[in-house]
Amino acid sequence: MRRIATCLRNERPEPDEGTVAVLVDEGPWGFVAVDGLPDLEAAPPYRREPLDDQGYPLLSDGASPCGFDDEVKEELARIQRRAREIGTGTGNGRKATGRRALTIYEVEVCAAMTVRRDAALRLRQVLADDINQYEAGMECVRAGLALDVMVPAIGGSARQTVSAATSAFESARHRFRLALVAVAMDNGISAARIGEGFGFSRQLASRYLKEAREQWPELVDRAAEMATVA
C-alpha cells in the first residue's frame, strides 16, 4: 500500500481566528491531525519507552510490571531454607542420615519442574523479542505501514511462535501440577485439600485425581482408602 503524496498542509483554507481545532493526542504515540489525517511533519519525534531501575520497560501507565507478590516469594524462600537444612542435617539439631530416596511421583515432579523451567525460559525469550518490537511497530503504524506487518513472514510467523511457546508452557504447567497431585494422593491428601492447595475447585481436583490414576494405575488414593477403612 503506497501513500500518495499530497499538499493538504498548503491547500487547506485559513480558518478564522478562534476556530482552529487541531486534534492532538498527548500519548507517546500521539499525532497532529490535518484534515483528519496524521500530519507526520508536525508530529513530535517518537519518545523511547522509559525503563525501570532494572533496565526493563515500564507499562504504558508508567508502572513497573509485577511478578509474584512478596508473600509468595517469602514462602518460597522459607521452603528453600527448610530444604537446605534437611539436606545438610542442620534442622532441629539432627544429623543427616543420608538423602532419602524419591518416590516415582517425586521423580516425575523433578522432571516436570525442569520441563516447565525450560518452557518458561523459551517463552520469556519469545516475549522479550515481542516487547523489543514495540517501538519499531509504533513507528510503522505512524508511517502508515500497519498493513505491512500483516504478512506471513512477520504476522503469521510471530503469532505461531508466541502461540507455540505459550502452549508448551501451559502443557508443562499441567504436567507439573499432575505430578504434585500424584505425590499428594500417595501421601493421603484428600481432593478437597488438593483443590485448596492449588486454589481451584474440588471438581477440578477430582479430574486431576482421575487423570493421575489413568497415568499411574498403581497409584492408590490413600485418602479414599483411609475413609473406607474408617
Image (cartoon, helix red, strand yellow):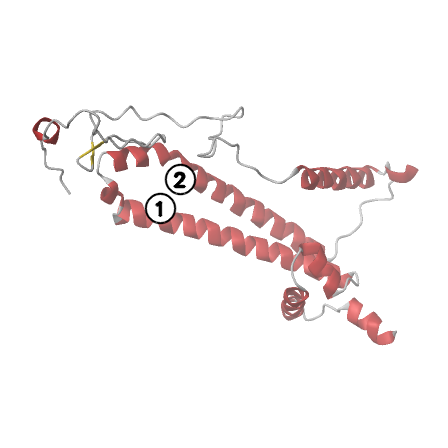
Q: Position of residue 149 (x, y in %)?
A: 27, 43
137 sits to left or right of 92: left
User: Residue at point 65% right, 68% down?
Assistant: 203
Q: Position of residue 133 (x, y in %)?
A: 36, 36
Q: Position of residue 88 (x, y in %)?
A: 82, 37
86 sits to left or right of 218: right
On the image, numbered disc 2 is attached to which residue?
130
On the image, numbered disc 1 is attached to which residue?
158
Is 10 above or below relative to 150? above
* Residue 104 seen from this side: no
Of residues 84 and 54, the one nearer the viewer is 54
* Residue 132 seen from this side: yes
Query: Which corner quadrant of the image does residue 87 belong to?
Result: top right
Q: Quadrant of the C terminus?
A: bottom right
Amino acid tagged 1? Ala
216 sits to left or right of 18: right
Query: Which corner quadrant of the image does residue 126 belong to?
Result: top left
Amino acid tagged 2? Asp
> Residues at badges 2 and 1 in contact (C-beta under 8 Å)?
yes
Is 205 above or below relative to 60? below
Is 63 above or below relative to 222? above
